[in-house]
Image (cartoon, coloured by chain):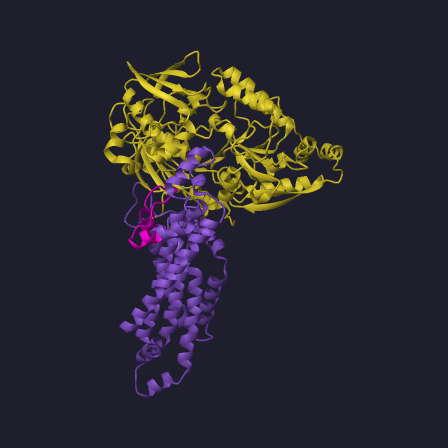
Amino acid sequence: MPSPRPARRRIRAGAVAASCALLLTAATGCGGGSDGARAAHTGRGGTLVVGATGSLPNPDTILGGAGYEGTALVGFQIYEGLTRYDLSKADAPAPVAPALATSWQVAEDGKTWTFTLRKGVTFQDGTPFDAAAVVFNLDRYLKKGSPHYTAALGAAAQEYGSDIASYRTLGDGRVQLVTTTANGHFTDDLTHLLIASPAAVRRYGPDGFRNHPVGTGPFSFVSQAAGQEIDMAANPRYWRGAPKLDRLVVKALPDPAARSAALLSGGAGLIDYPNPDDLPRLRSAGARIATNSYDHLWYWILDQSTAPWSKPQVRQAANYAIDRKAIAGDLLGGTAGPAYQAAPPGTLAHDPHGDVYSYDPAKARRLLAEAGYPHGFSTTVTVPTAGSGNLLPVPIAEAVQRDLAAVGIKAAIRTTDWSSLLSSEAKGQVPLGSQALAQSTTLFQSESLLPLFLGTGSPFWTGHYSDPAVDGLIKEASASVDPAVRQRDYRQALDRVTRDAPWLFVVNDRNPRALAPDVHGFVQPQSWFVDLTSVWVGK
Amino acid sequence: MRRFVLKRLLLAVPTLFGVTAVVFATVALVPGDPVLAFLGPGASPAARHELAGRLGLDRPLPERYGDWLWHALHGDLGASISAQRPVTQLLLPACGQTLLLAGAAFALVITGGTVLGAIGALRPRGLTDRLSGALSTLSLSAPQYSVALLLIAVFAVHWHLLPSGGTHTPFGGGPFDVPRHLVLPAVASALVPLGLTARVFRAALGSVLASELPDALRARGLSRTAVLRHCLHNASPALLTIGGLQLAYLLEGVVFVETLFSWPGLGQLLYNALTARDLPLVEGGVLLTAVFFVGVNILVDTAHAAVDPRVRSSR
């Protein structure tokens, strides 16, 4: 896209502002203004406008429908669960922390959980949070036939609540939740089961609540243009202390050029996923680019039910053939890191010493020859044209295609749209009948989802990868409430996956965000989610 | 005249019917699953099955279409799958935004096209003709996407004069807030139709001026302005035809402008609905767009008939 020379912006802007003063009575402010002067002394205040990549979620608790991006910017700002992610640190994967529950114990059976609830918390509408509110919300999500249950809520609650067998209040501010099987990631799951104000749900009903959502989170809902913009204000009663910002605005800006323009023109203070090509220009305009590891893998799923991907050496050869550093650095401008193993950095399963695949085309050719393909082979891959978390799917796939061709693997790219791809995948098929499929995934951000993608016969069993040892390890890890055991088992499982190479590990996204120069206090955690309570806007 | 309008209205019914049937079939037949798009890959097969059943997606296609048509005839366009709201609740505000944008662009097209065209026709081969010709050629041939980006780069990013997108400033903004947001997208959408309109109008007015009409009028002693008024009137049917076409183009063609300027109109809504395979929303949006098109056509034909008696008598 055409770009003016930003280095000269200030001088010319002054001259033009003078000459245009007659034509345009008011020049646009770039946010802040008088707010900024006040903020300079206090280190708080201001309005943060966030430019989000997709359409915005339904603000009714778990209904969302806009992926983790929607949960991050809206769901987790308005509401909390019994637990939450501590997103205040950047140097380790964000741990689960107490939220509406201050502490919990799990019984010997690994299934019976007792949560002690936080005292003195009020919802944004002033009504108190208590054990009855927890039961009310779980009824709303899980109990068919209860007054506020809807089929949509029930379907959405499957993702994180399908494990809950029963729940009850124990009196004196405690609740007991029982799971059907031992669940080591139960407290992770509970971060997503958001607790809404029962008074507000009763008052506005199932259709009205989405226009008047009320939780206990740091920001209260003010207004929305459905799917386009959600305006929020600081919750002065927030139990962790009122956020520094006065207001938070989340806008849907799906076009990358529009997002960059919004940041550069002062229309937004923070944008998600700036186009990697725009980074130099954003930086030269004073914007800060925040990145960090988090649970994200951009990969090809190789269908090993057919030759030649059925041979491990062939899959390993492909993994040695690609120059991940070039893709992450040159093509993606450092917004991603090379993926040398199955587990993404920023997850508990990542092993700092577990990298296997370097860029070694000679070794790739040798492995191919050993597998009986000295002259390589031709194959096909289906690539989505866009889609949540898929970065620049076609350009990345083309870079992989070039690297593979250099060792003799000629992969023809077939593009399709994200929705079509997902629906084939849900049937366990590679779309368009290709032999591989390019996409991105998270593995551990929600461990409850891991069995969907990995494991023999899993619902999205596109690549037909099967290793009973991996299945067993994942099952064991998932059932263990001991974090050390979970980490050990997951590492072992993912190490087997790395070596067996059912996938072509390409890059791990680093979740880039661009921040305007007047946005302060932002911490980029190792997570999909963000804590905006420490952010303020001003000069 | 009434007969003429009535006939056109009756002809519109099968058009709309055909459009909705074709779109229903197309969206239902292309791969992609609205339930999966909505629930995300994390949903269990049981949850997906249940939601599909609740939405009636497991029923045969003709039955679903019949059902949709029956409700649509009663003003009920169903509920959007992705937004879980009545389709009309989403369509009407988006429709308002598109009309606002298309209307502003149309005003630019008509005034700009008339002025540029008239300048060219009245002073052929003069400096002003060359300038207006160059302007209309430029607006016709410049790639719209690049021009739109250039407008943003210059007026929003470089000079900070106008916002880069959206319809309003969150939490406030003055009385000129919406017009300020409207300027860049309206100019970007107006460019191509403006150039076209200027060219057509220049040609139409030119041929009227070259005919015997002005001489005849002058011979009868009419003043210069009166002669010009008559000539403009005779050239106006061409303006109506091209203007009507451009209005239709604007209603449909603002999609990319809406995306680039984050303008929450019909185009953006329909695009998102299509990617989510949100059939009720797609159907509703397409129906509305088709109604627009047919309506604009009838309006233009009627206006044409009103201005030019030959059109009325020939039908």
Of residues B49 and B110, which is closer to you in this image? B49
Residue B125 lies left or right of residue A28; in this view the side is: right
Of residues B153 and A121, which is closer to you in this image? A121
Looking at the rendered image, the quarter that the N terminus of chain B falls into is bottom left
Residue A176 lies left or right of residue A469; in this view the side is: left
**Residue A171 place in picture, x, y as percent:** 28, 14
Chain drawn yellow in the picture: A
Of residues B150 and A112, which is closer to you in this image? A112
B162 drawn magenta: no
What residue appears at the point 54 percent right and 22 percent down from the top-left corner?
Answer: A474
As drawn, the residue found furthest toward the bottom would be B219
Total numbered labels placed on residues in the image: 0
**Residue A3 place in picture, x, y as percent:** 51, 48
Q: Look at the image and give the residue range highlighted in magenta.
A: B68-96
Image quadrant of residue A251? Answer: top left
B92 drawn magenta: yes
**Residue A190 place in picture, x, y as percent:** 40, 24
Chain drawn purple in the picture: B
Residue A415 lies left or right of residue A32; in this view the side is: right
Q: Is residue A101 above or below residue A144?
A: above
What residue appears at the point 45 percent right and 50 percent down from the top-left corner?
Answer: B27
Q: Is residue A151 above or below residue B152?
A: above
Residue A20 seen: no
Looking at the rendered image, the quarter that the C terminus of chain B falls into is bottom left
What residue appears at the point 32 percent right and 22 percent down from the top-left corner?
Answer: A239
Q: Is residue A510 above or below residue B136?
A: above
**Residue A103 place in picture, x, y as percent:** 37, 15
What residue appears at the point 49 percent right and 19 percent down from the top-left corner?
Answer: A479
Q: Is residue A384 above or below residue A479?
A: below
Residue A142 seen: yes
